[in-house]
Image (tube, helix red, strand yellow):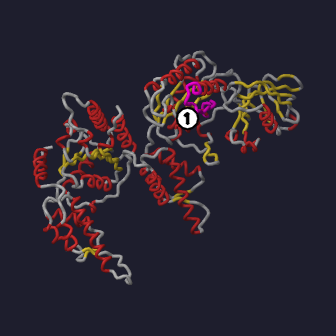
Amino acid sequence: MKLNINKHLNLEDLNDPTYFFIPILDESMVYATHVTISLISNPHNCSFDFIQNLLQQFFSSPKYLRSNDIISVNVQKYVPEIKCNTIASTWNTLHFRINKIYIKNKQLSRDGGFAIYSITRIIQNENKNSYFPRKCLCDIAIHIEESLVSKWVPIWNKLIEEIQLCVSPFLQKDICIHVKPIFLMEGPAGSGKSLRIKILAEILGLHLLIADFVNIQCPTFVKTEQNLQQILSEAEKCKPCILMLQNIHIFGVNSQGQKNEKVLQKFETEIDLLYSEKREYPIIIIATSDISEIPIDTEKIFTEIIAVKDLEEEDRYQLLSWFIESKGLKHQADLQQISKMCSNFVLADLEALVLYATKNRYKIVNSSNESDILELFNEDFIFAYEYMKSLFSNEIGSPHVPKVHWEDIGALADVKHEIIRRIKMSSLNISGLNKSGILLYGPPGTGKTLLAKAVATECQLHFLTVKGPELLNMYIGQSEKNIRKVFERARSAAPCIIFFDELDSLAPKRSEKGNNTSMHRVVSQLLVELDGLEDVSRIFVIGATNRPDLIDPALLRPGRFDKMLYVGVCSDPDSRLSILKALTRRFKMEKHGQELETLVHQLPDNLTGADLSSVCSKAWLRAVHRTLANANSNEKLIDDVIVRLDDFVQVSGELVPSVSKEELIRYKKLENQLSWK
C-alpha cells in the first residue's frame, strides 16, 4: 500500500481515500505517457535545469503516482554532486505536487499509474503553494554530525508543547482569527530555540525560512528597509511557512545601544501590511532572542512571548541518554548523577558534555590500544564537566558545588550545627513551617563565606555566591534584572544555596523621604524574590554582612533573613587551636602539631580566622626561606619544608589584628542587641 498525503488540515475532500492498493505484478503495471508536476514553493532558489535533472534521476526507476499526490525527493540522494555547492549543500528534500496523469493521452481522475523517465514525459508546471507531508515527532530525522537519528524521546514533546499550542489555531482553515501570528521566543544561547522551531515546522508540514537580524540590519535605514521587505517577500512566496527571525534583540539598536524609532516603526508597518489581507496559507513569524528582556517598543509587536524554560533533572537525563545513543556510543555511567551535576546546563551544553566525554575516552583508548568500541564511564563525564566549567565565564551567579569541607574550618561548631539544622528542617517541607533565611554577621575575616561554602559541600548543594556591589548597575532597571537572574539560576540549579555577601550594600535602609529611588526598587525586587521562595523547598538563602545595623529592616522579618547568627573572633585558646589545626593540616611540623598548643597562648584575643590564616602562610614562607638558605649548592634541595614553633612566634609578633579592641566591643554590643533574633 502507498500513503496518499492529499489531506492536510481539511484542505482536501474527506472522501478521498488515505490508503489504497497498488499493483505489483509486471503485467498489471500501467505506465503514464506524460505527467504534469509542480514544485512546491520553498525557501530555496532552485533553477529549472536543476529541477529537471533531479526529476530525471528520481524517475529513473518506476514510481507509482496519483493525482494530487505530494512526493518528497531526497536531493542529496539523487543529485550527490550538490554537496560541493556551499549554498545548495544544505538542501535535503524538495516536494512536488502531481497535477495530472495521462495514460494513452487520457487523463486519469482517480486511478494512478507508474511513471518512469524512459517512457513517461515529465512536464513542469508553475510552482504551487502547499503544505508538505507532515512527520510524526517520532519519525523526525535530526541532523547531528552527519548521522541521521530518528530515535524519539518524550522530552521532545515537552520542548515544543508550548509553542505548538500558540501556533496551531492559525493553521485551521475554517477559523477566522483577527490576530497576527507573530511570536517571540526568549531563552539563553544554546537552549534549543532554533531546534524547537525546526521540529515544529516538520511536524506541521510548514516550510521554514530563516533570517538573522545581524544580516538584515544595516548602517543605513534604506538598506535595512530593503532587506526587511525582501525577507517578507520571500516568506510570501514560500507560504505556508514559519519565518524564523533570529536575534530580534539587536534590531533597531545601533552600535551605541541607542534605539532607532524609524526602523522599529517600519518593521511594524511591514508586519501590518503582510497580514492586511486574508490568505489561504498562513505565514507564522517566530522571532528569537538570547536575552530575556528586549525594548518595550519591540516587544509590543508580538502576540505572545514564549520563554524557554530551564531543563529539569529528568529532562537532562533523557537528553543525555539521547545524545549518547544518537552517536552510537555505549556507556556505564550513572547518568542520573551526571544530570544532577549539570543543573544549569542548556541543550547545547549537554551535547558538548557528551562530545568532551567522548574525546577524553578516545584519548585513553587510543593511548592504551584497547578495543575500538568506545564506552563512556563516570570519570569521562566528570572530566568533561570540570573542563566545561573552566571554560565558562565567571558571570554573576554561576552555580557550582564548592570543595570546602568541615575539616577546613576550625571552631564555629555552634554556628555550623544551627545552619545544618535549619537547612534540614526546610528540606522536610513540613506544612505550616515557614521558610527562613540565615544572616551571618560579624567582623570581617571571621569565616562567614567559608562557612557557607562548607555547608553547601557537606549537604551536596549547589552554591551560588553573589557580592552585593556586583548586582548594582547604573542603568535604570538593570540592578533589578540582575537580581531576578540570580534567583532564576538558583531555581534551575536546585537544590541550591544562594549566598549574598556584603548584603548591606545591596539592601541598605530605605529612607522615608525616598531620596534614593533606585535603591528602593532594588530592595523591593529582592523582597519580592525572597517571598517567592516560599513555594520552592530546595532553595536556601544565606546572607553575610559586617554591618547588620545598616540592612533594611524589611529583610529581617519572618520568612526572609529572620535568623541571625553571630560569627565572631577567636576569643579563647580552644577556638584558636581548632582553626590553626585546620589551617596547618597539610603542613609538616617539627613536633607534629604539638607546638600549636604553646602558640595559642601567645596570640592576642582579638584575632580573626583571616589573621590566623595570615600567620600560618607567613610561617610556612619563613620556613621555606630557611630551608633554601641552609641548602648547600651541591646538596639536593629538600622537598619537605618543616615549620617550627619559632616561625610562628616570629611572624605573630609582627601581626597587627584586623579588628581593634574598640571595634570588638562595638560588635559585642551589636550581638547583645540582636541575640533575640
- Quarter of the image holding residue 200? top right
Q: Position of residue 592 (x, y in %)?
A: 24, 75
- Residue drawn at the location 36% of the way across and 45% of the way down: 397
Q: Position of residue 37 (x, y in %)?
A: 78, 27
Q: Is residue 300 visible?
A: yes
Magenta stretch: give its range. Answer: 202-224
Q: Secondary structure at mark 1?
A: helix
Q: Is residue 436 visible?
A: no
Q: Nearer the viewer, residue 325 or 207?
A: 207
Q: Is residue 203 magenta?
A: yes
Q: Amino acid at mark 1?
A: Val
Q: 364 left or right of 20?
A: left
Residue denoted by label 1: 214
Q: 557 left or right of 492?
A: left
Q: Does residue 379 sit above or below 622 in this rendering?
A: above
Q: Position of residue 644 (x, y in %)?
A: 23, 75
- For the C terminus, the quadrant is top left
- For the N terminus, the quadrant is top right
Q: 254 left or right of 472?
A: right
- Residue drawn at the location 72% of the way across and 39% of the way down: 74
- Residue drawn at the location 53% of the way across and 16% of the way down: 178
- Quarter of the image holding residue 581? bottom left
The residue most toward the bottom is 634
Mark 1 burial class by Cα count in 10 Å: few <14, some 14-19, many 20+: few
The total number of labels drawn is 1
Q: Is residue 556 magenta?
A: no
Q: Does residue 81 sit above or below 114 in this rendering?
A: below
Q: Does residue 609 sit above or below 272 in this rendering?
A: below
- Quarter of the image holding residue 88? top right
- Residue drawn at the location 59% of the way across and 40% of the way down: 138
Q: Position of residue 215 (x, y in %)?
A: 58, 34
Q: 603 left or right of 278?
A: left
